[in-house]
């Protein structure tokens, strides 16, 4: 974990010193016109007490962060039947409501462990819905190979202070990458976990990463994202195996607590 901390601090200062382009502020998607093109992003209600962000990549598949599938207090897996996907949730209504039939967490993801950056690199899950979302206004997103350092990206997310409507940050940047983990300048908060990070390719948004965590380095915020190139291919291959029964990781026996954890370096990791 210490190696990951040192890496993050180094790339943060190198990237911020050389960054020329400014990030755009968050913009709340309040109306149908605001959310046009982003309707496949939705809120994931994880049981009765928490939520994450997810996005459709097929009519019946939602992409989100693996750590969303675990109760943050007990470390136990959240039952699939206790998860609900609310596509384009705005102002108390959704364009589509779906329950989750079954879920698949990347087999190399662990909710606890010493190597934080390795957890970020595998922080991916796919959720199979009980019914596909078929609507002319809701188009699942394509995925794209991971971006490079300096590339411009955007993010659509829910968060604790904007849980009733999504927010769009049109421009933020990839500050660095290491071993499948991305360090980004995007603005995220609790509830943003699993939020899709996009590039625009041929005029269409394509998902290149997911929000895994937020971090503070000497009081300055950064986001950590998971590159999709390897982990998503792994999950789709597992889903296609045999009778399609999803494999689950070994049970978690202890809670990972990152909130408020600090080191003498001044880095603070927070799970959004």
Image (cartoon, rainbow, N blue to C red):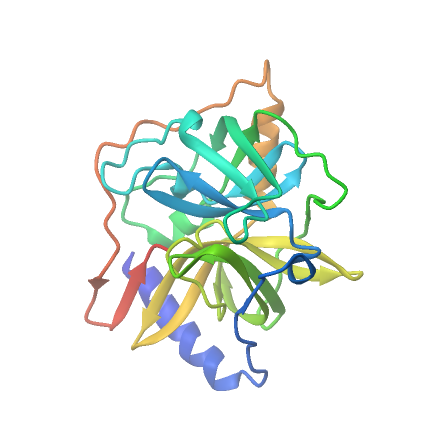
Q: Quarter-wise, where is residue 107 in the image?
A: top left
- Residue 22 higher or lower than 201, as above or below: below
Residue 106 visible, this angle: no
> Horizontally, is 84 left or right of 229 in the view?
left
Residue 230 location (% of width, % of height): 57, 44
- Residue 77 higher or lower than 178, as above or below: above
The C terminus, quarter of image: bottom left
Residue 105 location (% of width, % of height): 46, 34
> Horizontally, is 157 left or right of 272 in the view?
right
Residue 47 location (% of width, % of height): 36, 35
Q: Quarter-wise, where is residue 239 in the image?
A: top right
Q: For the point 66% across and 34% down, which residue is it?
A: 133
> Horizontally, is 127 left or right of 75 in the view?
right
Q: For the point 56% across and 71% down, which residue is it?
A: 173
Which residue is at the far left?
264
Please state which of residues 30 and 17 is positioned toward the viewer in this rendering.
30
Which residue is at the far top?
243
Q: Quarter-wise, where is residue 217 in the image?
A: bottom left
Residue 25 location (% of width, % of height): 53, 75
Q: For the point 64% across and 47% down, which residue is it?
A: 40
The N terminus, quarter of image: bottom left
């Amino acid at each position: 974990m210490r190696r990951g901390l040192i890496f993050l601090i180094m790339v943060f200062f190198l990237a911020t010193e050389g960054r020329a382009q400014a990030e755009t502020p968050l913009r709340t998607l309040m109306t149908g016109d605001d959310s046009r093109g982003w309707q496949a992003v939705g809120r994931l209600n994880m049981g009765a007490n928490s939520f994450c962000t997810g996005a459709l990549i097929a009519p019946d598949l939602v992409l989100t962060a693996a750590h969303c599938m675990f109760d943050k207090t007990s470390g136990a897996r959240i039952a699939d039947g206790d998860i609900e996907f609310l596509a384009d949730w705005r102002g108390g209504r959704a364009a589509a409501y779906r329950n989750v039939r079954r879920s698949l967490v990347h087999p190399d993801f662990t909710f606890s462990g010493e190597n934080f950056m390795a957890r970020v690199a595998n922080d991916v899950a796919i959720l199979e819905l009980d019914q596909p979302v078929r609507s002319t206004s809701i188009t699942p997103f394509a995925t794209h190979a991971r971006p490079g350092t300096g590339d411009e990206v955007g993010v659509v997310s829910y968060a604790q202070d904007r849980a009733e409507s999504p927010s769009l940050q049109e421009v933020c940047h990839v500050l660095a990458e290491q071993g499948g983990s991305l360090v980004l300048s995007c603005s995220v908060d609790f509830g943003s976990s699993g939020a899709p990070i996009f590039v625009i390719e041929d005029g269409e948004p394509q998902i290149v990463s997911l929000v895994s965590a937020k971090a503070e380095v000497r009081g300055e915020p950064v986001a950590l994202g998971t590159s999709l190139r390897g982990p998503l291919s792994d999950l789709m291959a597992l889903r296609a195996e045999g009778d399609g029964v999803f494999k689950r990781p070994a049970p978690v026996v202890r809670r990972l607590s990152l909130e408020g954890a600090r080191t003498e370096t001044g880095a603070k990791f927070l799970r959004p």
